[in-house]
Amino acid sequence: MSIEYNELLAMLMETRPEFATELYNFTDGPDLPDYDSITVSRRTLTLPEQPGRLRVCVAAAYAMGGERVVAVLFDAVLAPDPAQAESWLQFMTDAQRALSCMVAFVVLCRDARTARWALTYSEVGDIGCYVLPVVIPSLLASA
């Protein structure tokens, strides 16, 4: 996915952090824990097998009383892209290590086929992380 989609997503969330919560609430993930603040940032990485390609995703870190309770990462996908999906686990483990909290990864998909594909990456091992696909057209229809 081109970086521009995730940059736009980051700008929207920086302007209105609750947008991250609204997107998360469209997933089948567990309810978010209680929180009193949301910090939005961009996370980047370069995979060893793709040294010339920068990957970017948006992170919303939820905290209660100054302590992080969960982080939700977001990535936009227009079509199945195994190379992009391979970066999700690295984003999740890096975020979990840096933020010391549970991490969920929300994949914004253009269609149901892409969402089903993204769901195949939902089992990433017992590291307290999971992938949750959301189909964007269904969000637009309910807006």
Image: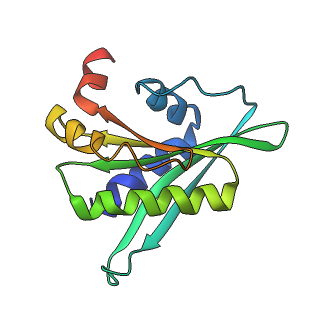
Image coordinates for residue 106, horizontal then vertical, percent: 42, 41
Quadrant location, the C terminus: top left
Quadrant location, the N terminus: bottom left
Q: How many marks?
A: 0
Residue at horizontal 36%, vertical 42%?
122
Q: Is residue 135 left or right of residue 63?
A: left
Image coordinates for residue 101, horizontal then vertical, percent: 67, 47
Q: Nearer the viewer, residue 74 or 2?
A: 74
Image coordinates for residue 128, horizontal then vertical, percent: 56, 44
Q: Looking at the picture, does residue 74 appear above or below residue 32?
A: below
Q: Is residue 38 left or right of residue 126?
A: right
**Residue 132 sits in quarter:** top left
Q: Nearer the viewer, residue 38 or 116?
A: 116
Q: Is residue 40 left or right of residue 24?
A: right
Residue at horizontal 33%, vertical 40%?
108
Image coordinates for residue 32, horizontal then vertical, percent: 60, 27
Residue at horizontal 52%, vertical 36%?
20
Q: Looking at the picture, does residue 30 appear above or below residue 3?
A: above
Residue found at the very far top of the displayed protein: 142
Q: Is residue 38 left or right of residue 92?
A: right
